[in-house]
C-alpha cells in the first residue's frame, strides 16, 4: 500500500485532542485510530505491539541477521489533530496533475492560491490532497503515521537489512501534553525521529524556548458618573500592558530565528481582565530577557495604578532541543545523507514551535523531526502531495539502511 492510500484511510477517522481536558488521552476518539493502527501493525509483523490505557501505541521490529549491533532507531508520529476545523466529517479531495494555480476547495468558497501560498507553484504536476475546505485535512500528523508504516512494509517486502527499530504512535501532541507520558523504557530506542514536519526534505532540530504568560488585572469599579480619580478600569490597564510590549515582536512581524510575544486570548470588564500570552525565542538569553520585560511592565503598572493591580504568572513549557541534538549530530548528518540519496536537497530550518521530540530529547531520547511532505497545517488550507509523501518514505527507508551499514 502506498503512503497516500494509508493517509486517506486515516484522515476520515477524526481525532481532535482537547486542550481543556485533564485526562490522557485528552479525547477518547483517539482510540478509534489507535485500534485501527494496532491491527495494521500486527498484520505487518511488528512485534510486541502494545496499546496502553493512555492511548500510546508501541511496537518493535528486531534487527535482521548481521545488523544486531546497530543502534535501536525509533520513529514516532502522533495520532491527534488540532480541534479547530474538526467538528464534522473530513472529506479529502484529490487533484491529479495539479496545475499550480488557484484551486477551489469543494463548495466551501475557500480557494487555495499561490498568492497566499507561493510554494504551490513548485507543486505543479503533482497529485494534491486537500480537504473540502470546511475542515482540516489531518495530514498533521497522519501523514507521519502513513509514512512510517509504509516504510515498515517496504522493509519487509523488499527484504531490506536493518538494525532494531522501534515504532510509536502517540496522543495529545497538539496539546503539548502527550510526550510527558511517553514510556521510554517500553519504546526501547537509543535515538529516534519524529515524522511531524512539513516539506519532505525538511530536517528540524532547533525549536523555540517556550513559556506561557497569564496576566491578570484587578480594577476598581464604581459608578462611571462619580468615578473621577477612583475608577481603575482593568480592561484599559490590560490594553496598556499590551501596548508596552516591544513593537514589531509579534508572530506576524517575525520569521526564522526571531522570537515573539503572542496574545492568545483576552477577557475583561471594568473590575477584572486577563490576557493569555505565549513567549517564544530560539536563543535562551533572549528568551529570559523577554520574560524579564513582561515582569518589568507588570511592576511599572503596579507602581502607577497600585500594588496588586497586575499579577503575572509565567510557566516554562519546553526548551530548544538543539542543546541535546548537537551532542548527537550523526542524527542530522545521516538524515542529510538519506535526503541526498533519494534526490532531495536537505533543508535545515529552525522550528517556529515545538515537537514531541523536544520533550523526549530532554528526557534522554535525542529526537529530531523530519518532514512528511505537507503544508499549511492547522487550518482548512492544509495540503500534501502524493509525490512528497513517497519521497518522505524513501528518505526514512534510506535512513534505516544508513544506520544498518554503519554498524555492521
Image (cartoon, grey):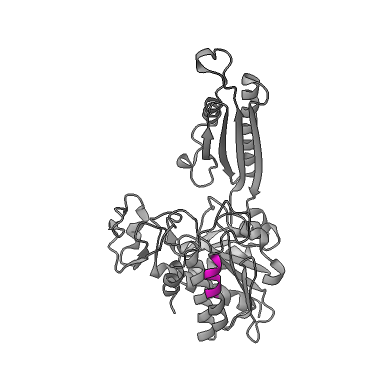
Left or right: where 392 falls relative to 298? left
Q: How many marks do you count on the picture?
A: 0
- Quadrant of residue 297 within the rendered picture: top right
Give 221 or 342, whichever is nearer the viewer.
221
Q: Please indicate, yes or no, whether residue 341 appears anywhere in the rendered image.
A: no
Identify whether 151 is placed above or below 16: below
Residue at image position (54%, 86%) is 159
Q: Could you tell me residue 135's position as x and y percent? A: 40, 58
- Residue 175 colored in magenta in the image: no
Q: In this view, does 293 lie above or below 221?
A: below
Left or right: 106, with 147 as reference point: left
In the image, 121 versus 137, the foreground residue is 137
The dominant secondary structure in magenta is helix
Q: Which of 273 and 101 is in front in this view?
A: 273
Q: Give the range drawn in magenta.
A: 30-37
Any magenta on residue 35? Answer: yes
Q: Percent from the top left, x then y, of residue 355?
A: 58, 57
Residue 292, position as x, y percentages in the image = 65, 34
Q: Where is residue 219 in the image (x, y as percent from the top left)?
A: 59, 25
In what quadrant of the picture does the N terminus appear?
bottom left
**Left or right: 194 with respect to 341?**
right
In this rendered view, identify the residue nearer to me: 168 or 306: 306
State whether residue 356 appears in this view: yes
Amino acid at each position: 500500500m502506498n503512503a497516500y492510500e494509508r493517509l486517506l484511510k486515516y484522515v476520515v477517522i477524526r481525532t481532535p485532542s482537547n486542550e481543556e481536558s485533564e485526562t490522557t488521552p485528552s479525547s477518547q476518539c483517539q482510540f478509534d485510530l489507535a485500534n485501527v493502527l494496532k491491527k495494521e501493525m500486527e498484520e505487518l509483523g511488528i512485534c510486541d505491539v502494545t496499546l496502553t490505557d493512555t492511548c500510546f501505541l508501541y511496537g518493535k521490529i528486531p534487527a535482521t541477521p548481521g545488523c544486531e549491533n546497530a543502534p535501536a532507531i525509533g520513529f514516532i508520529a502522533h495520532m491527534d489533530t488540532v480541534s479547530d476545523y474538526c467538528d464534522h466529517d473530513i472529506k479529502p479531495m484529490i487533484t491529479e496533475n495539479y496545475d499550480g494555480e488557484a484551486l477551489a476547495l469543494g463548495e466551501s468558497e475557500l480557494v487555495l492560491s499561490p498568492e497566499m501560498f507561493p510554494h504551490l507553484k513548485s507543486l505543479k504536476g503533482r497529485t494534491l490532497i486537500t480537504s473540502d475546505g470546511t475542515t482540516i485535512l489531518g495530514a498533521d500528523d497522519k501523514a507521519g503515521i502513513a509514512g512510517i508504516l509504509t516504510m515498515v512494509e517496504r522493509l519487509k517486502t523488499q527484504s531490506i537489512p536493518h538494525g532494531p527499530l522501534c515504532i510509536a504512535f502517540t496522543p495529545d501532541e497538539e496539546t503539548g501534553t502527550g510526550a510527558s507520558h511517553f514510556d521510554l523504557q517500553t519504546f526501547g530506542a537509543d535515538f529516534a525521529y519524529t515524522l511531524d514536519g512539513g516539506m519532505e526534505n525538511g530536517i528540524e532540530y532547533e525549536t523555540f524556548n517556550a513559556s506561557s504568560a497569564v496576566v491578570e488585572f484587578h480594577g476598581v469599579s464604581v459608578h462611571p458618573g462619580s468615578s473621577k480619580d477612583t475608577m481603575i478600569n482593568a480592561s484599559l490597564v490590560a490594553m496598556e500592558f499590551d501596548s508596552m510590549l516591544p513593537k514589531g515582536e509579534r508572530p506576524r512581524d517575525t520569521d526564522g530565528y526571531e522570537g515573539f510575544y503572542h496574545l492568545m486570548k483576552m477577557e475583561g470588564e471594568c473590575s477584572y481582565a486577563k490576557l493569555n500570552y505565549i513567549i517564544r525565542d530560539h536563543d535562551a538569553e533572549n528568551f529570559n530577557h523577554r520574560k524579564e520585560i513582561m515582569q518589568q511592565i507588570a511592576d511599572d503598572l503596579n507602581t502607577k495604578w497600585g500594588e496588586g493591580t497586575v499579577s503575572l504568572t509565567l510557566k516554562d513549557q519546553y526548551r530548544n532541543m538543539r542543546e541535546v541534538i548537537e551532542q548527537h549530530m550523526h542524527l542530522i548528518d545521516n538524515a542529510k545523507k538519506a535526503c541526498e540519496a533519494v534526490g532531495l536537497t536537505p533543508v535545515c530550518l529552525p522550528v517556529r514551535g515545538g515537537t514531541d521530540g523536544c520533550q523526549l530529547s530532554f528526557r534522554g531520547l535525542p529526537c529530531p523531526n523530519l518532514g512528511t511532505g505537507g503544508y499549511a497545517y492547522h487550518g482548512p488550507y492544509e495540503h500534501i502531495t502524493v509525490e512528497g509523501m513517497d519521497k518522505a518514505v524513501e528518505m526514512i527507508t534510506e535512513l534505516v539502511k544508513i544506520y544498518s551499514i554503519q554498524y555492521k
